[in-house]
Each structure stands twice: as C-alpha cells, then as structure tokens.
Amino acid sequence: MTNQPKKSAAKLILSSTIILALSACGSSVSNHDNSGLTVSENLSSLIIGQVTDVTSNSITVNDHIIAADSAEVEIEGKLSTLANIKSGMIVEIETNGTYATEIDYDPVIKGPINIKNNQVNIAGITLSNVNSSDYSEGQLFEISGYSDSLHSLTVTYQAPITNSQAELEVQGSISHLNQQLRTFNLGDLIIDYQQAYIEGSLNNGQSVEVEGFYDNSIFTAIEIDAAQSFSFTNNMDTELEGIITFVNNNMSLITLNSQWQIRINDHTQFEDGTIANLVVGQFIEVDGLWLQDENILLAEEIEFESTKTKPTSTSHQFSVAGIISYKQDIATINDIEFTFNSQTVFEDGLSINTLDGQWVELEGTYNNEQNTVNEVELEDDTSEISLRGLVSENQNQQATLWGYISEDNSLTPYLNQTVNLLCQWVASNQIRACIIDD
C-alpha cells in the first residue's frame, strides 16, 4: 500500500472509475484500427472500472472499447498478459488517448469467506451477487466489485485462492481495538498487528486496509493503511463510475462507492436524468476535475446508468446539528459518537483540530455499528436544526432522535420511523415543534 497510488486507487474504488477526457468531458468517438476493430478514440489518460469484455487485442471498460494489444499488463504488481484479464475485474488503464499503454488489476479483497445468518462476508464486508455454489466457510477468495455501503459489496468477479500461504488483503471498519494486545476486529475476523507497519492512526470505527497472512482464524497483519489518501494530478479531467452511497441534504455533495467524494454545482450537467435522480443506490458515470488539495472530484457532467441494478444498501443517511465535542479522537453530539475518515469533507474552513465546541451540522451514513460522517459544516442559525434518522425510545421511554428530546412531544408521532425533520432548538438536547422537512 505504501507508495503505491495506483494500487490504492484500484482498491479504494471498492469500485470506482477515473478518466482523463482529452476533449469534451466524457466524449469519445469510434474508429477502426488496423485489425478492423471498432475502438474508442479521444480516450482519457486514466480509466478505472469494470471489465465487460476482453479480446486478443482489446478491452472494454465503462462502455469504452480500448485497443490493448500493445499494453503492458500487471496483475497484483506482476507482469502478465491480456489473456489473464477477466470480465468483471475492476482494472486501471493508462492510455495515450487512442489505445491502452498499461493495464493493472488488483482485487478489492482477498481473504477468508465467513458465513453468518445466511450471509456471506469477508472481514465484515457483506458480499451480494456472489456465486453461492463456488465457496465454503473459511475458503480463501479474491473479490472485485462495487461498494454500495461501508459494509457491503456487490461482487462483479470472484475466484478461489488455492495457495493457503498467499499474501492477502482485507478492508473494513475497526472494532474491538485492543492496543495492549495489538489486535482489532474487522467483522468477525481478528487482526493481529503486533509486527505491522501502520500508516495513519487506529481507532474504533476507522476504515483501514490490511495486508497480511491468514492462519488458524487469525489474520496476521504486515501492513495497515488507515490514511487511505489518493495521489492524483491536480485538475485532472476525471471520470468515475459507480454506486451512489450518500447524498447530502442540498445535493451539493455525493459519495460514490463509499470512497469518492463528488462536488456538484450550478454548472454540473446531467444526461438521462436530473439532479433529482441523485439517490442512494443509483449507478452513475461522472466526468469532472480532480481537486487534489480537497481530495474531491468537481463534477462537470453526470450520466445516469438506468440499466444497472440498484443494490440493497445496509446503511441509512443521517443529518444532525448541534454542539460537537471532540476529545481523544472521539467526536460526539449529545453523547452519541460519530466517526470521521479520510473521505470526510470539512467545509467552512473547519478541520479535525477546530471542531471541539463548534455548532456544526454532520451528514453521513449509519448502521448498527457506527455513524460515519461524510460532510461537516458550520451551523450559523441555531434556532432551527435539521435532524434525519431513526426516532427511537430512550431508557425513560421518551422519543429521541440523535440524543434530542422534544419538550412538546412532537417527536412521539414519528417513533420507530426514519424521518427528515425540522425542529426548533430550545437548549442543550431539548427541541420542540418538529415537523417533516420536505
């Protein structure tokens, strides 16, 4: 992982796509090469996406047919051939604008299959669209696919690993961190990191990539990446393809494949849809500029792929406003913990070091395990606050949402419902006059 930006990009995509468009954003034309093959021209300089077809002299990715008979091919960092690239793999392709010059493939996950409650997972990542006749408990597999939440992946390619001594790679969110024993969990998988090189800091809820070896139910880590930063050229024209996993309230920020943050403005154009079609689970293709300093893509054009199957997401979106406490790497509002990661976007000049005591609005995704923040903004007007999530009952049998309690019982009608509310803030964790926010 260290000093391997292309490898990290292909994995962190948990299935995304990058393209440099040399002319109009997302445009390409077709022509015939010397063999008579109809290929795309005006290609981007860098393409990352799912292979849908491979021939002896071409590869098709993101609907681009790319001449590839002279391309250098690497699989997991080793020289290979085009014949070893298979449909469904997520690959990274460098081009000169006309044909592929280099093709790289790295699996998203390589690890042991775990079957729990009739669901298949690797290191806590639930796998959907997996071939159920092709695996068994504990068997080692390599997986490629699209992440449709922090804890789920739609599989596009799978293959068994026959070498039990092979170096593996898993990823997920840390739980049960024990700094004394130097262990943590990714789902049910125990990670022993006593001898591991660590990039970034380890905290419960932090997303990590882990390389190592598996034996007797223990995954021994040799390298852990908790930073997950990208190294791309600033202002690179870029194309991403994947599944929307988050949309903020004003539709100015979306997340693709739980990894790539995409900013939308008044200049963003839409094809085969409108901004209203930006919903979680939708498959899209995005053209824009990569802003390296912000670690974000500025979208110029978004095309909706209506033919793609929408996955069932295991995460829900949330928004909450309030006074944030940030101490010892733990962020809370009303004593409820929220997790930041390398993809969290800090607006209004905020940073992780200036959060404590601020009035902020947090937006992100949540499930039974954690609340992951995608965007942080300053909250100027504290008289009204937006709250989005599941209204539940606290130990005092009061309806509550993100630790807030309504003094006029206006939360009670929404008990056990996931709602988007606008409420008047009173004081501390007291609110009133909560109504549906359309």
Image (cartoon, rainbow, N blue to C red):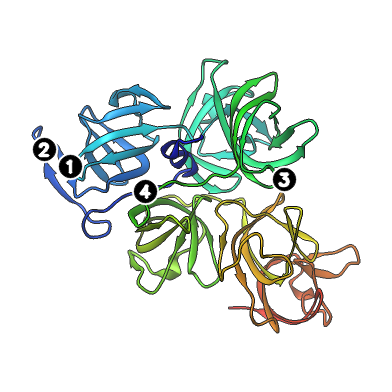
Q: Are marks 2 and 4 in contact (CB under 8 Å)?
A: no
Name the residue tied to disc 1. 39
- Mark 2–mark 1 contact, CB under 8 Å? yes
- Amino acid of disc 4: Ile
Q: Quadrant of residue 263?
A: bottom left
Relative to 251, does residue 234 appear above or below in the rendering? above
Residue at which label 3 appears = 204
Instruction: Give x and y (percent) for residue 170.
Output: 58, 33
Q: CA distance from mark 2 to mark 4?
A: 24 Å
Amino acid of disc 1? Val
Distance between the Cα atoms at labels 3 and 2? 53 Å
Q: Disc number at residue 18?
A: 4
Residue 378 x %, y %: 62, 73
Mark 2: amino acid: Asp
Q: Secondary structure at mark 3?
A: loop
Instruction: Compare marks 1 and 4 and give the one earlier in the sequence.
Output: 4
The numbered mark, 2 or 1, whose residue comes first in the sequence reads 2
